[in-house]
Amino acid sequence: MAKAGQKFYVVWKGIKPGVYSTWKECQGQVKGFEDAKFMSFPNEKQANFAFKDKKGMWAYLGKKKAATQANSNNTASVGGPVWESISVDAACSGNPGVMEYQGVYTKTGKLLFHGGPYQEATNNVGEFLALVHVLAMLKQQNKKLPVYSDSKTAMAWVKRKHAKTKLAPTIRNKKVFDLIARAEIWLKTNTWNVPILKWDTKNWGEIPADFGRK
């Protein structure tokens, strides 16, 4: 049985065309496949209908259909992700709660770094720390790969060079606040020339760095 809010993915042009129930499965069929064509749908029924539709994929690709057929535009019409990039994400067991973050190579999902777990933190703080971590890493390695995040808040904090968190400092999260302070100092004393891009979850599914705990 499909979970509430679960998306299904139609791959028209990929390694093995078909309907897939997770972004990871879909990604495995389109990753590195030239001119892949795929799209997410809000439920399995709509996905199967679209895949079997005799009108073909172009009845969906490049057009915005009624909600009864699809709730989202396809990646081809809105533009797909830059696969030669790094994706970051965070997970937190509560608000506040135990937090960790990680960065992966977008194209393959290969883990590049991981931070945590940290006590009494928030997801936004984790997303922020992940972004600063990857910026510092890329500068140290003299690389200019684009960076994807699905957090507008974290991206705004990086732009302002300040984590505007409402998290209250305690003895248990002292390490977290030490990391925030270090991150803010790094942002204020360094420059970087890599694009920080918003991951389009609606059209592309979960960011590759997602912990898969939703």
Image (spheres, grey):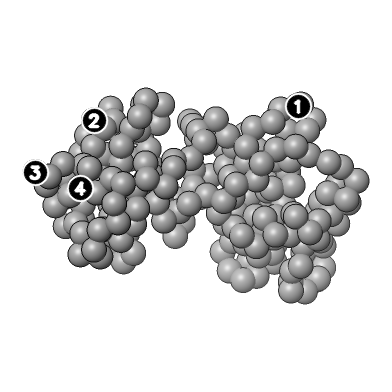
Distance Cα–Cα, label 4 vs label 1: 45 Å
The kind of residue on which mark 1 rests is: Gln
Secondary structure beneath dot 4 equals helix
Report, in whole angstroms, how far the alpha carbon at label 4 lies from the one at label 3.
Answer: 9 Å
Determine whether 94 is above or below 212 in the image: below
Residue at the disc numbered 4:
59
- Answer with the quarter of the image where residue 177 lies: bottom right
N-term-proximal mark, 2 vs 1? 2
| Count of marks overlaid on the render | 4
Circles 2, 1 touching at the beta carbon (< 8 Å):
no
Q: Are marks 4 and 2 in contact (CB under 8 Å)?
A: no
Q: Amino acid at mark 2?
A: Lys
Disc 1 target residue: 141
Callout 3 touching callout 2 (CB < 8 Å):
no
Provide residue 128's location: percent of width, then percent of height. 70, 55
Residue at disc 2, secondary structure: loop
State which mark lies toward you, 4 or 2. Answer: 4
Q: Quadrant of the N terminus?
A: bottom left
Label 2, label 1: how many angstroms apart (C-alpha)? 36 Å
Q: Which residue is mark 2?
A: 16
Residue at screen point 52% across, 49% down = 199
Q: Residue at point 60% right, 54% down?
A: 90
Q: Which mark is residue 54?
A: 3
Quadrant where the C terminus sits is bottom left
